[in-house]
Image (cartoon, rainbow, N blue to C red):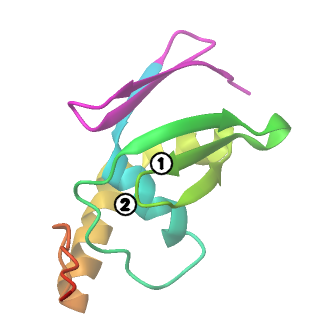
Amino acid sequence: MLTITRFVIHQKLQQLAWQFSSNESCQLPFEYLRVYSSQRTSKTVVAHKKSVRLINIDLVGKHGFRFTFDDQHSAIYSFDYLGELYRNYQAYWSEYLAQLQQAGQSREAMIDIKQL
């Protein structure tokens, strides 16, 4: 099993990069990581996450890493699941975009306006 030796959060690119013990590296968008944190357990399409930011990563023992996003969502990503997300990026992303379109949803962030 490969282990992750380093994470780099690229806020300007809105991407997370990581390096494995084999020196292989990966990079994925925050939006994709956020969407697929819930996608695996829920059939509800997660929309409006285009501008989401990854703000923290914590090691959770043998279980993997807890990613915390600026929309107050956090989820645990195992080493295997991160590898799966990387290997299947093109297929999963295409599937997600099709699901969004079918549900009539958008990637764009929503602004919640409240009258005072």
Q: Which amino acid, mark 1?
A: Leu
| Residue appearing at x 36%, y 39% in the figure | 28
Q: From the image, which quarter does the C terminus lie in?
A: bottom left
| Residue appearing at x 52%, y 61% in the figure | 73
| Residue 42 % position (x, y) | 55, 80
- Nearest the viewer among 85 and 67 is 67
- Nearest the viewer among 62 and 111 is 111
Disc 1 crowd rating (10 Å Cα; few below 14, some 14-19, many 20+) is some
| Residue 24 % position (x, y) | 49, 16
Identify whether 99 is placed above or below 79: below
The numbered mark at residue 92 is 2
Element class at badge 1? helix
Quadrant assignment, res 112: bottom left
Q: In whole angstroms, how far apart are the C-alphas of marks 1 and 2?
A: 8 Å
Identify whether 95 is placed above or below 1: below
Identify whether 82 is placed above or below 94: above
| Residue appearing at x 20%, y 67% in the figure | 109
| Residue 3 % position (x, y) | 69, 23
Tally of numbered discs = 2
Element class at badge 2? helix
Q: From the image, which quarter does the N terminus lie in?
A: top right
Q: Which amino acid, mark 2?
A: Tyr
Identify whether 31 is placed above or below 80: below
- Left or right of 72: which side holds 66? right
Q: Of label 1 and label 2, which has the lower sequence position? A: 1
Q: Which residue is mark 1?
A: 85
Quadrant assignment, res 2: top right
The boundaries of the magenta stretch are: 1-24
Dot 1 and dot 2 residues touching (CB under 8 Å): yes
| Residue 111 % position (x, y) | 18, 73
The numbered mark at residue 113 is none
Q: Is 70 covered by the magenta stretch?
A: no
